[in-house]
Image (cartoon, rainbow, N blue to C red):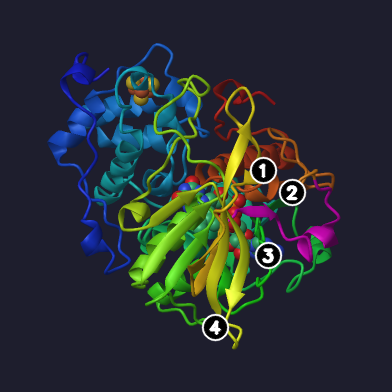
Amino acid sequence: MGKVTGFKEYARELPPKRSAQERINDYKEFTGCFTDDKLNHQAARCMNCGIPFCHSGCPLGNIIPEFNDAVYKENWEEAYRILSSTNNFPEFTGRICPAPCEAACVLGINKPAVTIEEIEKHIIEIAFSKGLVHAKAPLIRSGKTVAVIGSGPAGLAAAAQLNKAGHLVTVFERDDKPGGLLRYGIPDFKLEKWVVERRTKLMEEEGVVFKCNTEVGKDISADELLRAYDAVVLSGGSTIPRNLPAPGRELKGVYYAMQFLKQQNKRVSGINFEEESIMATGKDVVVIGGGDTGSDCVGTSNRHKAKSVTQFELMPKPPEARTENMPWPTYPMLLKTSTSHEEGCERSWGINTKEFIGDENGNLKGVRVVDVEWETDVFGRPLKFKEIEGTERVLPCQLAFLAMGFLHPQKEGLIEQLGVELDARGNVKATEGVYQTNVNKVFAAGDMRRGQSLVVWAISEGREAARRVDQFLSGRTALESKDAESMYAF
Ligand SMILES: Cc1cc2nc3c(=O)[nH]c(=O)nc-3n(C[C@H](O)[C@H](O)[C@H](O)COP(=O)(O)OP(=O)(O)OC[C@H]3O[C@@H](n4cnc5c(N)ncnc54)[C@H](O)[C@@H]3O)c2cc1C
Ligand code: SF4
């Protein structure tokens, strides 16, 4: 433990951010860094708990008290070694993770949690700046080949781990650049794309081959793939968005969130796209769906200089603090005000969109909405809603984004050709911890297996699936696991 009294002496602080008025004029990240003193104080707040709940809160099993201690002692090499032993890409999670570790931090019982996510980001960026991060190609190659389908965080993590184990890994990606939603979903103002490219370049130097603009199931058949590779990891994400089949859905001006976000990331990177350009400039924008994707549409619309931005959520407004139904250390479903919300957005909860209204040319001009009230169970969980009489109204809207989550992976092509079994939700069926599908030598990880989730879970699944693939190919594995006891247990 760095400083015994640290948690009593220092308050939780976050690094400074550029003001909302300033940052909506560009797409750059806006969170600064701690000064050396501030970083030291934040690390000193860690109590090195006897039972560090932060570990179990983190899907990667990050060894948090140990790296906090190393940061406090300014032992950057040690901090980086500890952090990178469980997380291949702390530069992603340090920027965009909702930090379930912080929700589980013991300090959170009666004080604000340790700033674990920021400390993580500082460790990896300091490690890069000190030249501690470099390509480490394996000394011996196994001669076995693995195809990874999809280059999101799950595919990247699986590829990095399998390459480390000595296998020859090829990552197939249908987009023009690797990164999955890190590249073409999450906006630059949350994660600048040089951060993704810095990592994929390192992976290439380590020996991972990326084949972009290649859709498996279309450009290469599943059969060809099975013949050419000793193992296959499916990590194609959960890409089919939930629709809102209300009257007027076909109007010009109603889009899925990803149609908007993907092309904006391309625009920022100067990459051409063929689709019709969607701009929020001067428009009344309505974002339907209250999650991360919706919040990214809000931030992007404000950067386009929309006339107004409103976000609807069908569910009731969540509480601002833990209730007795969500005690520490569970992950609390609290009201989240994202940095995009801070930039300007009207937020409405308990509101249902009944109709998209168009003008004579088929352009969206308004949305018909109604307020709803929810019936809840004894734990306060919403069960069903009913409309509140007299609240139906039409709001002006020329651009609406559907951001109500994703249903399951695309079935046409890869999944159908392979004949992999799907679970009840339509995701690829492969038990957690095993990751093997019903098709011999085919494994699955990330959103394609667990359904729409988080970057940290995708990395965790990619790493754990890689262990299973390594065991399958080599009969044993020395790859690290989040479950330390299972290491070397084969
Ligand atoms: C807009 C948005 C914002 C988000 N923000 C956050 C956030 O702030 N924090 C967070 O933790 N999570 C966030 N998420 C969730 C997170 O991005 C995902 O959970 C995560 O990226 C899933 O990783 P993955 O590797 O499983 O799949 P993806 O990242 O979806 O990658 C799958 C890749 O596979 C490729 N692919 C699919 N099929 C084929 C095929 N047949 N052949 C070749 N390539 C194929 C796709 O093109 C894609 O590049 C966000 C999601 C969205 C949509
Ligand atoms: S739970 Fe919080 S205080 Fe305890 S070891 Fe983890 S980060 Fe430190």
Q: Earlier in the sequence, mark 2 or mark 1?
A: 2
Spatial distance from mark 2 to mark 3, Cα to Cα?
Answer: 26 Å
Give the residue number, with chain letter if any, for mark 1: 450
Q: Secondary structure at mark 1?
A: helix
Residue at 37%, 45% (x, y): give it.
337
Q: Is residue 294 left or right of residue 10?
A: right
Q: Is residue 217 left or right of residue 212?
A: right
Q: Quadrant of ligand 2?
A: top left
Give the residue number, with chain letter if any, for mark 2: 427
> For the residue marked with disc 3, what is the amino acid?
Ala
Q: Residue most toward the top?
A: 50
Instruction: Say which of 313 and 142 sits in front.
Output: 313
Q: Is residue 442 left or right of residue 479?
A: right
Give the residue number, with chain letter if any, for mark 4: 276
Q: Is mark 4 within 8 Å of ligand 1?
A: no
> For the residue marked with disc 4, what is the amino acid?
Glu
Residue 317 showing in the rendered view: yes
Q: Earlier in the sequence, mark 2 or mark 3?
A: 3
Range covered by the magenta-colored residues: 404-422
Q: Secondary structure at mark 3?
A: loop
Q: Residue most toward the front?
A: 390
> For the residue marked with disc 1, what is the amino acid?
Arg
As displayed, is residue 465 above or below residue 279? above
Residue 246 is labelled as 3
Are discs 2 and 4 less than 8 Å apart at CB?
no
Q: Is residue 480 left or right of residue 34?
A: right
Are discs 1 and 3 less than 8 Å apart at CB?
no
In reply to whether residue 72 is colored magenta, the answer given is no
Q: Nearer the viewer, mark 1 or mark 3?
A: 3
Spatial distance from mark 2 to mark 4, Cα to Cα?
Answer: 30 Å
Residue at 35%, 48% (x, y): give it.
133
